[in-house]
Each structure stands twice: as structure tokens, then as C-alpha cells.
Image (cartoon, helix red, strand yellow):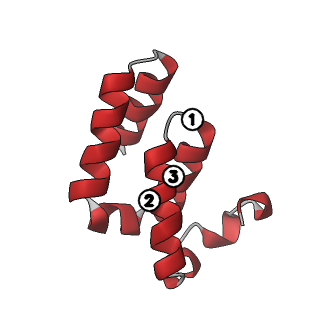
Amino acid sequence: MEILEILAAADELLLKDLLDYIQDHLVETKNDWISSYILKIYQTSLAHDSCEKLREFILATISSDPELLFKSPDFLSLDESLL
């Protein structure tokens, strides 16, 4: 999950180009990884306003396959406000 730490650091340091690159890379090449950690990635995207591309991708992914959300090992600990 180091990529999420780098994403958060890029947001905090206002490194927009790096932030955009990471989001594009994740969305374009890491669909399986995103599906495996969808709630953790979604929570990270919510915590950082600049992660809008990633957040929109995750919401679209969940909309097209809601089971990803319900089968996630983190589902039971999900804050209800995120639903």
C-alpha cells in the first residue's frame, strides 16, 4: 500500500503532476489491485480532495459491481457515512 502513502504525500506537498500521474497509473493499469483494496483506496481518496479522478473511478467501479464493496474484508468496519 506504499502507493497510497505516496499519493497522500503528493497531495499534502501539492505535487499536482505526481498526484495526477499516480491516479492515472492506478486507473489505467491497476484495476485488479484497486478491486482487491477498494475500500482502503476509496477512504484514501476521500481524505484527499485532489484525488477526484481516483474517487470517481472507484465509485463507477462500485456502481457497476457492488459485490466488490460487500465482499471486501473491510466492509464491516466501514463508516456508514461512506455509504
Work out how far the residue at label 1 is from the one at label 3, CA to CA, in angstroms: 10 Å
Residue that badge 2 annotates: 57
Secondary structure under tag 3 reads: helix
Horizontal and vertical percent for residue 78?
68, 63
Q: Which residue is mark 1?
A: 48
Quadrant for residue 17, please give it.
top left
Q: CA distance from mark 2 to mark 3?
A: 5 Å
Give the mark nearer the N terminus: 1 vs 3: 1
* Residue farthest top in this picture: 13
Indicate left or right for 38 with 1 as reference: right
Give neighbour class at mark 2: few <14, some 14-19, many 20+ (Cα, 10 Å). some
Q: Is residue 40 left or right of residue 36?
A: right
Amino acid type of the residue tagged 1 in the rendering: His
Please state which of the two labelled residues, at mark 2 or mark 1, is closer to the viewer. 2
Q: Position of residue 22 (x, y in %)?
A: 30, 38
Task: Count every numbered label the image shows and give the total.
Answer: 3
Q: Classify mark 1: helix, strand or loop.
A: loop
Question: Residue at the spot x=37%, y=46% of the render?
Answer: 1
